[in-house]
Amino acid sequence: MDDKRRAALLCRLGVIVGRRFVESLLLFGRVFRHKKPLRMKLIVQKYGGTSVANPGRIKNVAQRVRETCAQGNQVVVVVSAMSGVTDGLIKLAREVHPAPDDREMDMMLATGEQTTIALMAMALHGLGLKAVSLTGAQAGIVTDGVHTKAKIVNITPKRVHEMLDAGNVVIVAGFQGVDNAGAITTLGRGGSDLTAIALAAALKADLCEIYTDVDGVYTADPRLVKNAKKLEEISYDEMLEMASLGAKVMQSRSVEFAKKFKVPFSVRSSMNNNPGTLVKEETRKMEDVVIRGVTVDKNQAKVTIAQVPDKPGMAAQVFKAIADANVNVDMIVQNVSASGHTDLTFTLAKDEVPRARRALEPVLREMGAGGVACTEGIAKLSVVGIGMRSHCGVAAGMFDALAAEKINIQMISTSEIKISVVIDGAQADRAMNIVHAKFGLG
């Protein structure tokens, strides 16, 4: 091929390649122009009282929030009252009145979280971030009308979405809401956990992080059992049992809510960047672990009603009166009838005893029962694990370990995935370590 023909061929090839290149650029431009922008992740973070205990810790949390925002995320922050504030408010109320009205208690207790949200917003402003604080009512959290332990019935987070879309970090007061009559309500101890989980569900958040003063969920309270081990993951059911049985990491109702709405969440420390414990739906491999953890609850009391007439309907009357007073009962034991009467014993939270006693007095007079005896200084020791469903001998092992150390069992309660016993409160810590070691959890 001579030089002239070669030059013509190269020229024609160049035109074809150039045209294809231009077409590719135009096509890329059309695709890029119509491609939807990547959605920012929405993260809900909850910080407990110890995490915001003082101005320094509030600033540390603000730094953590800024880092999360810097990764391209939208952030909703739920905070508790500063450590000790709620207890101080309760003490103050009881100095004014020994049995303060529940509605007014809610009005006062809600101020603890409102102080924290304002301080957190100020700390974020100091770091150059846009931030706005909202009370539970302003965030659209509607509850029933049961003061001091209200249940969330609905969340309309329109205002939260608007604030997020405007580029704000939204800080929501945990532990509180508003009933249909417009009265402020609170969600009970640990209610900020419930606020965070419920908001994560309502906002369809990508992630919910519960920050506390421990690194995650352990096989036992690491402050009481030195060789307790942190769990990488745990099922909703196991976490629910552990929370209701005395583990102070999470409020039980918040775990129940997370399970109902399938909200996976992690429990982490706000003091470091260590990975936490993921709480999620049960998986097959979880069943391989027989015992997941051991808990102890020292905030327990035992109530015994003597000489209850042994006839149908008596227990129903007793427990209906207690339920109407919004008191939760745990273990129940009825003794064998003797001379037409029986004794009825149950456990409940220690601070619920006065309310339960007031509710029972008129009912017991009406049925002709004997007196009510309340015993404090007890503790509830429990082992939890979904693997117990398919493994036998757990109860025997637990009872044998306690017997060997001369620890007496006063009451027993079981379910598919837990065994609980009532013991002397003075022996609780030792018993916890004994049972933890018995099942090789360290």
Image (cartoon, rainbow, N blue to C red):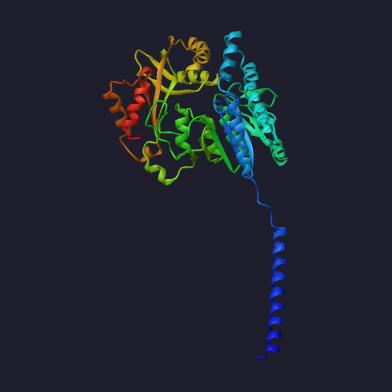
Between residue 346 and residue 170, name the one nearer to us.
170
What x and y, as percent, mark residue 434? 32, 27
Image quadrant occupied by the N terminus = bottom right
Left-right relation of 362 to 297: right
Please tell me in which quadrant of the rendered image residue 338 appears.
Answer: top left
Q: Which residue is at 59% across, 36% downward?
A: 64
Asked if residue 340 is positioned above or below residue 274 in the image, the reply reads above
Image quadrant occupied by the C terminus = top left
Q: Which residue is at 56% across, 22% downward?
A: 83
What x and y, as percent, mark residue 113? 63, 25
Q: Which residue is at 71% across, 37% downward?
A: 163
Between residue 74 and residue 178, name the one nearer to us.
74
Asked if residue 31 is positioned above or below residue 194 in the image, the reply reads below
Please tell me in which quadrant of the rendered image residue 43 appears.
Answer: top right
What x and y, as percent, mark residue 292? 40, 36
- Is residue 156 at least partly visible in the picture? no
Asked if residue 340 is positioned above or below residue 21 in the image, the reply reads above
